[in-house]
Image (tube, rainbow, N blue to C red):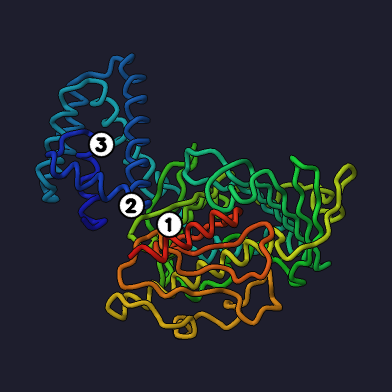
Amino acid sequence: MKCAECKELLVGYMEKVLAEAEKRAVESHLEACPPCRAELAQLIGLRDRLVTNGKDLAQTNLEDAVLDRILREQSLKLRKANKIDRQLQLWRKIMKNRITKLAAAAAIIIVALIGIHQFIGPEVVWAEVLENIRNSRTLTFLIRTSEEGPPIAKAMVIDPYLMRTEFLGEQEGAARLLGGQILIVDAEKGKGLVLNREKKKAKVCPADKTALPIYDTFRNFRDMEDFSVEQVGRRWIGDIQAVGFKLKKKEGEREIMVWADPETKLPILMEETIEDAQGRVGQYVVTDIVFDAELDPILFSVEPPDGYKIEEPEYNSVVNRVKSAVNVDRILKACRKYVAENKGQWPDSLKELTKYGIEEETFINPQRPEREVGYIYLKPPASPSEGRIVLYEAYDEWKEGINVGYAGCRVQFVRDESDFEKQLRESSQSK
């Protein structure tokens, strides 16, 4: 089902008048489409507010004859516009209920009086949103795996050099790897600090000595050449009727939805959707976005605080561990493209992936940069099992663990050497 077809059925879906097959088709589409989910949420919010208005008006003495005339005229307009029968059926349903009749009449009168432009709020274009991000000095936000889910990380930025990320507990992915830790970067000093709050340990590590402009840090919006931008309508977020922009990478699986406040022309919520090798859709959400808040500079100090034991920097620092996981992820995605273009066959060597934008530095493990070979590649047969190991960090001595890549395009940090060796044996025996 395409978005246009889904949107045509949203009102019927909301009012539970669809046939079972249509209902299942809409639900399946909504599961994988953030813009259509947003439009449904907007419709539900509008309906709820209209019902509330109707309950208030029900206490008045507005004559049924007046209401009926308003709604009959609107029904005639629908017929003249050749609207589908389902919409007319919904109007008949409305006509039978005094509360919803009053609410609908109120909405028609309001729109007629104040005009549709004012009703939906001011227009916003993406260039204005991007410019306002660039002009902001500070930024804070939360990262979640779903809009309703608990936050997994909190980020704070002072443009152009300071960033602090607090990982909030045992979650999936990077948050599970870094749960309970704080990462602070001072790019001007070229210095980073990792704090383990539970163990009261601190690690000082090098950081790239480059600026971290706020618009670059906030989902790398500075470099938009690889993205197309499409305005996709509005949805209610709290009491704000936000304007949506779909940012889609022209080549790849990345899609970002940015919802902006039409008054401030700044983002208030962001959703990123990524499709994995099996076609499964994953999502994370950035919420509680605040620009230009007052932030205490002491929060961004890269000097270990009192009471923390300072550990010597190691190759297996948290920063380099995450960078290496990103390398493994990029290599796996390039392998996926190769497989798609070569009848299911995997490349003979990683060097064949350079045509997919993989640079030579991606093959260098930042945890062990002195090694000539950063990653071990194990070419699998065609159509391997998702859990088969195809890539892992090369190592001479096992320390805290290594990043491992699987045929299902999944990256996992394996801490236990015996567990890794067991997985390796099972992979060699599997298809």
Residue type at mark 3 is: Met
Of residue 97 and residue 415, the one placed in the foreground of this image is 415
- Residue tagged 1: 273
Q: CA distance from mark 1 to mark 3?
A: 24 Å
Q: Position of residue 202 (x, y in %)?
A: 81, 51
- Residue tagged 2: 32
Q: Secondary structure at mark 1?
A: strand
Q: Residue 14: which disc?
A: 3
> Above or below — where is 4 with respect to 201?
below
Question: Residue at (48%, 62%) from the top-left corner?
Answer: 424
Q: Position of residue 251 (x, y in %)?
A: 40, 74
> Above or below — where is 371 with respect to 261?
below
Residue type at mark 2 is: Ala
Of residue 360 and residue 379, the one placed in the foreground of this image is 379
**Tag 2 and tag 1, C-beta contact below 8 Å:** yes
In the orientation shown, which residue stands out farthest toward the right?
Answer: 306
Of residue 83 and residue 139, the one placed in the foreground of this image is 139
Question: Residue at (19%, 32%) from the top-left corner?
Answer: 71
Pair 3/2: label in front:
2
Looking at the image, residue 261 sits to the left or right of residue 26; the answer is right
* Quadrant where the N terminus is found in the figure: bottom left
